[in-house]
Image (cartoon, helix red, strand yellow):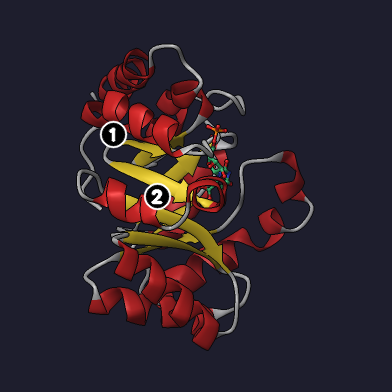
Amino acid sequence: MKINTGIVLALDVTDRARAVAVVKAAAPFVDAVKVGYPLVLGAGLGIVTELSKDAYILCDFKVADIPNTNRLIAAEAFKAGAKGIICQAFPGKDSIAAVVEEAKKHGADVFVVTEMSHPGALDFMAKNAEDMARLAASAGATGIIAPATRPERVRALKGLVGSLQILSPGVGAQGGSAKDAILAGADAVIVGRTIYESQEPDKAAGKIAAEIREARK
Ligand code: O7M
C-alpha cells in the first residue's frame, strides 16, 4: 500500500449513498478506504467495485478459515476491485499463505491482524500477538494490524516485523492518538467514527493528516 497521508478510512457505514458521500469528502486526506462487513452486508459487494474506481479499497473481511476457503474469499474480494485484504493470523501459516498466494495473482496486499485494539484483546490475542506477527512476516504478508490504543505494543511488534507495514486502529473513538501510534512506528492509522460521524468529514480527516505530518517531523 502506498503511504502518503497515513490515514486509512474505516468506512463502517451501512448505506451506499452515505458511504459514497463520506469517501468523496475525505478522499484527499486518505491513502485507502477500508470496507468491511457493515458496508458490504448493507450495500452489497458492488460497493467495493464502485468505490475502487477512485480509491484503494482494503477489504476488511478478517478472513479466518482453512486455506481453500480463505483463497475463495480473497479471490472474490480482488475480483470485486479490492487492492488489499485483511486476514486473521490464528488459523495458522497455511491459511495466511493461501491469501498471500491469491493476492500475488492480483498484485494486491495482505494485512494480518495481530493484537486488536479493544480491551477484550487482552484476554487472548495479546498473549499470542508476537507469534502472530512473526507468522505474518514468514507467510509473506504486506503488513500487520496493531493497536493504536496500546502504542507500546505497536513498538514491540514493529521490532519483530521489520519492514512490514503497520496499520493501527483505535484512534479517536477508542481513545488512541494518531501521533502516538505514528511515533511508535505505525505507517498509517485506521480511523472510522472520528471521520464518518463528523459533520465535516474532510475537516476531521485533514486534522488527523496534519497531526501525522507533525509526528513524522
Ligand atoms: O475509528 P473507529 O473506532 O470508529 O473504527 C476502527 C476501525 O478499525 C473499525 O473498522 C474496526 O473494525 C477496525 N479495527 C479496530 O478497531 N481494532 C482492531 O484491532 C482491528 C481493526 C481492524 O481494522 O482490523 C483489521
Numbered disc in front, either 2 or 1: 1
Local crowd size for mark 1, using a 10 Å CA cut-off: few (<14), some (14–19), many (≥20):
many
Q: Earlier in the sequence, mark 2 or mark 1?
A: 1
Among the 4 quarters of the image, the one containing residue 7: top left
Considering the image in quadrants, where does the C terminus appear?
A: top left
The residue sitting at 43% across, 52% down in the picture is 158
Q: Name which residue type carries label 1.
A: Val
Image location of residue 175, percent across then percent down: 60, 24
Instruction: Identify the element where label 2 is drawn.
Output: strand
Q: Position of residue 177 (x, y in %)?
A: 49, 24
Which residue is label 1 attached to? 30
Please state the quadrant of the image where ligand 1 appears: top right
Please give the residue where the numbered disc 2 appears in the rendered image. 166
Q: Is mark 2 within 8 Å of ligand 1?
A: no
- Number of other residues with Cα within 10 Å of mark 2, as a class: few under 14, some 14 to 19, many 20 or more: many
SS state under label 1: loop
**Residue with the most extreme right position:** 123
Q: In x, y percent, where is residue 174?
A: 62, 29
What residue appears at the point 20 percent right and 43 percent down from the top-left corner?
Answer: 54
Q: Which quarter of the figure has residue 107?
A: bottom left
